[in-house]
Image: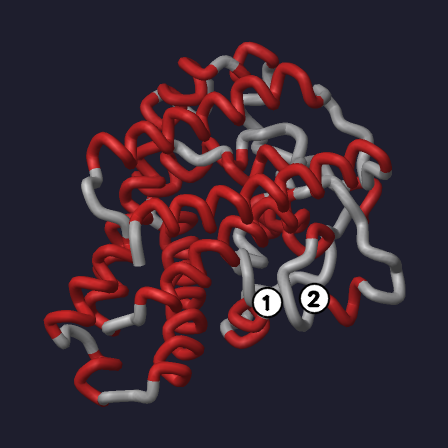
Amino acid sequence: MSPNLEIAVRFGAFATVFAAMALWEGLRPRRRLVVGRHPRWLSNLGILAIDILAVRLLVPASAVAVAMLAGSRGWGLFNLLDLPAWVATIAGVVALDLIIYAQHYVFHHVPPLWRLHRMHHADVDIDVTTGVRFHPIEILLSLLIKMAAVVALGVPPLAVLIFEVLLNATSLFNHSNVALPSWLEPIARWIVVTPQMHQVHHSVVRAETDSNFGFNLPWWDRLFGTYKKEPAAGEAGVTIGLPVFRTTAELGIVRLLTQPFRNDRA
C-alpha cells in the first residue's frame, strides 16, 4: 500500500465525516454551547494542525508502514499462527480497539498521563472539534503504543488502515453535538459509541469522567464495568469539562499546549 493511497483514504474519510457532523450539529444541535463554535474551533483545529505537524516531523513511518514491515518479516502473533487474512484483519481491528480502550483507561488513572489527556477534557463544550483536540505529546505516545501493538500482534496493514479510519470517524461522531432518534439510541449504543453515551465521559463529575472509555466499539465498557448509561444530572443538566481551566483565557493555543505543565488547582 503506497503512502499516498493511505493518506488519500484517511483524509477523505476524515473530511467527509467532519463535514457531515459539522453540518448536522449546525442544523440540529443537541445542546446549547456555552462558549460557541468560533473561539473554540480556531484553537481545537489549530491543535489538530500542530498534532499533524508533530507526527510528520518526529515519526517517519505510519502505523500502516510498520504493519507492512512486520508482515514482510513475519513478526507478531497473527503471523506466527498463520491466520487466514480475513481472520487476522477482523481480529486485528478488534484487538487494536481493545488496546485503545486500555490506553484511554490508563491515561485517566496515571497522574502524569492524565495531565496530558485532560487538555481534551478541559473543553467546556463538546462538539465535532473536541474529537480532534488532543495534546501533541499524547498523540505521539498513542502512536508509539499503536505501533508496538501492531508489531507484537502482527496486525495486517489493511486492518490497521480500517482501524485508523474507524477511530477517526467514530471520534468525530461520538464527540458531535448531535442526537440520534430516541428509538435508535439504545440500539445503536450496542454497536458503536454514540454521542449521548460518550457525553457522560465528558461530565465535570470525576466518577462520570472515569467511565465510558470506548471510542469505537461500546462492548469494552460493559465487559470491564466502566459503563454508565447516563449522567446523574441527566441529559439537560450535565456540565461538560473539568472543574478547572474553565475561563476563556484557556482557549488560546499556547494555554492549551502548556496546560499539562501548569497547576491544576490554579
**Residue that badge 1 annotates:** 218
| Residue at (81% x, 55% y) in the render | 180
Would you identify the image quadrant in which residue 29 lies? top right
Name the quarter where the N terminus is drawn. bottom left
| Residue at (38% x, 51% y) in the render | 6
How far is the residue under mark 2 from the one under mark 1?
7 Å
Given the image, on which type of amino acid does mark 2 rest? Arg
Q: Judge whether 145 appears above or below 128 on screen.
A: below
Q: Check the image and name the residue furthest to the top.
A: 249
The secondary structure type at the circle numbered 2 is loop
Judging depth in this view, the residue of 66 and 190 nearest the camera is: 66
* Percent coordinates x, y for residue 117 in the rendering: 42, 39
Question: Which is nearer the N-term, disc 2 or disc 1?
Answer: 2
Neighbor class of circle 1 (other Cα within 10 Å; few <14, some 14-19, many 20+) is many
Relative placement, left or right, of 34 versus 99 is right
* Percent coordinates x, y for residue 210 in the rendering: 53, 52
Relative placement, left or right, of 243 versus 96 is right
Neighbor class of circle 2 (other Cα within 10 Å; few <14, some 14-19, many 20+) is some
* Percent coordinates x, y for residue 122 in the rendering: 54, 30
| Residue at (51% x, 49% y) in the render | 168
Would you identify the image quadrant in which residue 225 lies? bottom right
Relative placement, left or right, of 52 versus 189 is left
Q: Judge whether 130 appears above or below 147 on screen.
A: above
Judging depth in this view, the residue of 184 and 90 nearest the camera is: 90
The secondary structure type at the circle numbered 1 is loop
The answer to the question of whether label 2 and label 1 lie on touching residues, with beta carbons closer than 8 A, is yes
**Residue that badge 2 annotates:** 189
* Percent coordinates x, y for residue 81 in the rendering: 22, 89
Judging depth in this view, the residue of 35 and 169 nearest the camera is: 169
Given the image, on which type of amino acid does mark 1 rest? Pro
